[in-house]
Amino acid sequence: MSFFAIQVVTGKEDCFKDNFNVGRPDIQCFNIKKKMTIRRKGKMVQEITCLFPGYLFLVYPEEQLSPGLIHDLRKANWFLRILPATERTSPLNDRDSALINQLISFGKEIGPSLVAFTPDKKIRVIKGALMGLEGLIVSVNRRKRRVRVKTQLSDSPFVFDLSIDILETVEEQQK
């Protein structure tokens, strides 16, 4: 199984996925979403947004897309291109495929990850989508309860935020 990244018009990811799956139900397309708690007008609300706006991930059993599938993709509404280029398609490399596979394993929406901080201020993920991605975390905002993750996908840098729940560790006080 190989993963291919498809760029579509931003905001039309679900429309593209639904319309494409009607004509090609044999092809799996994933729109990875995240569930974030944000503050709006002083109230905390849950918001569900795309993790990679404008991108979908297609699972295909072979290393190259068939010409018929490429034709169907090009004819679909809101299609822009296949990364790195539609004329010379190639699957995501092993590192990118492992990241996408890990993210889609959490279902349709990625919820908050449970994290703890070590005494030397390092983050440790206890459970959730961030498990194993500690090295990719570039910043932590404890007040907003989110982390910023930087990765590369098809040699293009991507930065995204994910929600966290902080497990407070109680340090023993010396008497």
Image: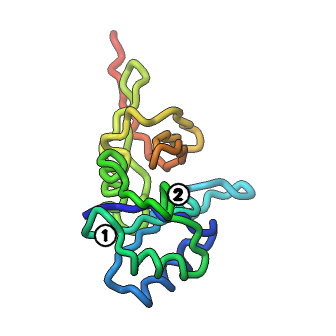
Residue 119: image quadrant is top left
Gap between marks 1 and 2 measured at Cα: 20 Å
Secondary structure beneath label 1: strand
User: Which residue is painted at 32% across and 45% down in the image?
Assistant: 95
Instruction: Please name the amino acid that badge 1 sits on.
Output: Tyr
Q: Nearer the viewer, residue 120 or 134?
A: 134
The location of residue 103, given as percent across then percent down, is: 36, 56
User: Which residue is painted at 28% across and 62% down in the image?
Assistant: 63
Instruction: Please name the amino acid that badge 2 sits on.
Output: Phe
Give the residue at mark 2: 52
The location of residue 78, given as percent across then percent down, is: 61, 75
Q: Which of 125 and 71 is in front in this view?
A: 71
Q: Residues within 10 Å of mark 2 (few under 14, many from 20)?
A: some
In the rendered image, which quarter contains the C terminus? top left
Secondary structure beneath label 2: loop
Q: Which of marks 1 and 2 is nearer the N terminus?
A: 2
In the rendered image, which quarter contains the N terminus? bottom left
Q: Nearer the viewer, residue 67 or 76?
A: 67
Q: In this view, does 133 lie above or below 121?
A: below
Give the residue at mark 1: 60
Q: Residue furthest right?
A: 41
Q: Is residue 34 visible?
A: no
Q: In this view, does 29 lie above or below 95?
A: below
Image depth: mark 1 or mark 2 in front: 1
The location of residue 136, given as percent across then percent down, is: 42, 36
> Do the residues bearing badges 1 and 2 touch, measured as CB atoms within 8 Å?
no
Q: Is residue 13 above or below residue 115?
A: below
**Across the whole image, how many numbered discs are drawn on residues?**
2
Q: Can residue 60 be seen in this view?
A: yes
Q: Residue furthest top?
A: 175
User: Which residue is painted at 52% across and 45% down in the image?
Assistant: 156
